[in-house]
Structures are given as structure tokens and as C-alpha cells.
Amino acid sequence: MRFMVIVKASPESEAGQMPSEELLAAMGAYNEELVKAGVMLAGEGLHPSAEGVRVQFSGKNRTVIDGPFAQTKELIAGFWIFKVQSLQEAVDWVKRCPNPMVSDSEIEIRQIFEVEDFGETFTPELREQEERLRAQMSSQS
């Protein structure tokens, strides 16, 4: 099972405040544990929403909205992709994480859909396309 582990933004991360050397070292040690255990597939921090945009869809229309965005607690400051056996295992790993923010923070865990989750609506042709695209992405890394 794969899970996206989402680090919610804080007022400090949205202000562009960089983590301390101490926090970077603690997160580096945590990431090293994750990698050694074969849990971490990816992980990155994100720039503040002021440097991002949103694209809204309405039928065939697209509207680009510049950041920053309101509701800091709903924004994402970073993420990991974990490969574990269960949601509980993902929770157990997250509970070992150093607080990723200077202030109180929150991490959300969401399971990633796998091909099997789509059932028969994911036709053999769509499966072949998915496998081909994943192979192309792997060769580009």
C-alpha cells in the first residue's frame, strides 16, 4: 500500500521561514530511517503558496489564480510517499517524525489509489497505457 503523507502548512512556512539547522538535521535523520526501512519512496518540501498558482476548471474554461491562498491550515508545506503494509504502519511512522514546524503542526495521511482499486472500469488498454507511462517515468529518473 502506498500513502501520501502530507505536511500541512503553518504561518511560518507560508511566510517563507526556513527550518533551523537543528530541524533539518532531525528531519534528515528521520528520512534516513525511512529510506533504510524501505518505507520512503519520495519526499519534498514545497515553497509557500505565494509562489504558486491554482487552476480552476469550469467546463472547458480554465482560470489561473495567483497565490498566496487563504486558510493556511488547508495548505501543504511538504509531503512523503510511503510504501507500507497498512494505514496503521503509516501512522506509526508519522508518530516518530520530529515536529516539522516551529509551531504546532499537523500531518495528514491519505492512501494512494492502485490500479486494482478501479476494478473493471480500468480496461486492459488503460492498464497497458498506465504500465507504459510508469516505465517511461522510471527511465527518466
Image (tube, helix red, strand yellow):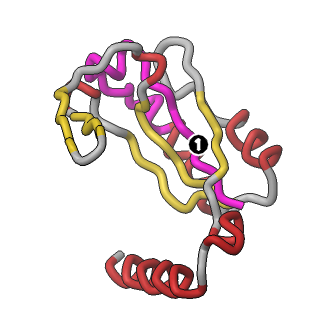
Identify the residue at horizontal 47%, vertical 30% (top origin).
23
When the figure is inspected, residue 22 is found, relative to residue 62, above or below; the finding is: above
Q: Return the residue nearer the eye: 57 or 66.
A: 57
Report the side of 96 relative to 46 (left or right). Answer: right
Crowd class of label 1 (few under 14; some 14 to 19; many from 20; radius 10 Å):
many
Magenta residues span: 1-25
User: Where's residue 14, x and y in %?
Assistant: 32, 20
When the figure is inspected, residue 111 is found, relative to residue 15, above or below; the finding is: below
Q: Does the magenta stretch include residue 21?
A: yes
When the figure is inspected, residue 120 is found, relative to residue 101, above or below; the finding is: below
Task: Report the quarter where the C terminus lies.
Answer: bottom left
Quarter location, residue 50: top left
Q: Is mark 1 on a helix, strand or loop?
A: strand
Identify the residue at horizontal 78%, vertical 47% (top origin).
87
User: Where's residue 56, x and y in %?
Assistant: 28, 36
**Is residue 131 visible to us here?**
yes
Q: Name the residue under label 1.
A: 5
**Is residue 34 visible to us here?**
no
Quarter location, residue 106: top right
Report the side of 23 relative to 139 (left or right). Answer: right
Quarter location, residue 96: top right
Q: Does the magenta stretch include residue 8?
A: yes
Identify the residue at horizontal 52%, vertical 86% (top origin).
125
User: Where's residue 42, x and y in %?
Assistant: 49, 57
Task: Report the quarter where the N terminus lies.
Answer: bottom right
Q: Return the residue nearer the eye: 5 or 25.
A: 5
Q: How many marks?
A: 1
When the figure is inspected, residue 37 is found, relative to residue 78, above or below; the finding is: below
User: Where's residue 118, x and y in %?
Assistant: 66, 65
* Amino acid type, mark 1: Val
